[in-house]
Amino acid sequence: MLTLYFGRGGCSLASHIALEEAGADYEARQVDFATNEQQSPEYLRVNPKGRVPALVTPRGILTETPAILAYIAQSFPGAALAPVADYFAFAELQAFNSYLCSTLHVAHAHGRRAYRWADDEAAQAEMKRKMPEVVTACFKMVEDNMFRGPWVMGDQYTVADSYLFTVAQWIEGDNVDTSLIPRVMEHRERMKQRPAVQKVLEREANA
């Protein structure tokens, strides 16, 4: 039995979808950021970082989306959520997920949580002003150089698709120029047709 701690609207959506696609036996527990539950002593015992996702496994607790997605894909090989037997292809998938985690998500966070990087109000304001341009450039990099189609890695659906879908949920809020990323937008709509995605979106909306 696995337990996923998620936050509504956060990057944990990718892991939530992956667990559902894998057919895993799991429980999903919401961490309420509106009440600052992520900083509660109870949750900090699960994840001292005070963030989501966190996945409780029989061997311990995993954090960070790329690590959790890789674990799910490797733990449920029958679901074919990653090319685990092809070391190079699996590394390519990891490179994609790492880009979303380390570059695109961080750029997004500069608009929402600029206080993490600067105390000066003017500096924070400049980060927020710059954020749409930087996030658009990140999505353009995905569109032009990383996305193969119809799924991220080509013909085979993988955990990278749940991650791209998750960060694409933030596009309108980040004022991204969607005319520059038509394939990313088509992918987002394609994802919404998958039963696992529909189930998880409904569950999180009603959490």
Image (cartoon, helix red, strand yellow):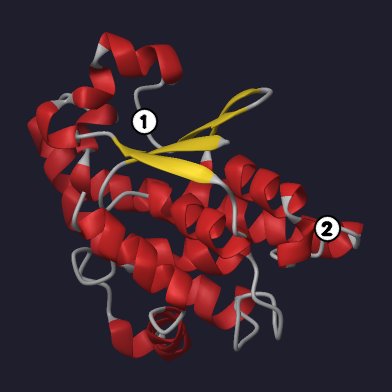
What residue sits 62% from the left and 77% below the top?
145
- Quarter containing the N terminus: top right
Residue 151 badge: none
User: Quick check: 11 above or below 81?
Assistant: above
**First of labels 2, 1 by sequence position:** 1
Q: Residue at x 19, y 34 (%)?
A: 33
Quick one: label 2, few (<14), some, or many (20+) residues within 10 Å?
some
Residue 137 in view in this figure: no
Q: Which residue is disc 2 drawn over?
A: 84
Q: Is the residue 71 above or below the residue 130 in the image?
A: above
**How far across and how far down the image is residue 196, in percent?**
46, 69
Please give the name of the residue rendered at 65% of the width and 26% of the height, measured from the top-left corner.
58
Whether residue 173 is visible: yes
Q: In this image, 53 relative to 88: left or right?
A: left
Q: Secondary structure at mark 2?
A: loop
Which residue was labeled with disc 1? 51
Q: Residue at x 45, y 65 (%)?
A: 138
Give percent across and percent down for residue 59: 69, 23
Helix, strand or loop for disc 1: loop
Q: CA distance from mark 2 to mark 1?
A: 28 Å
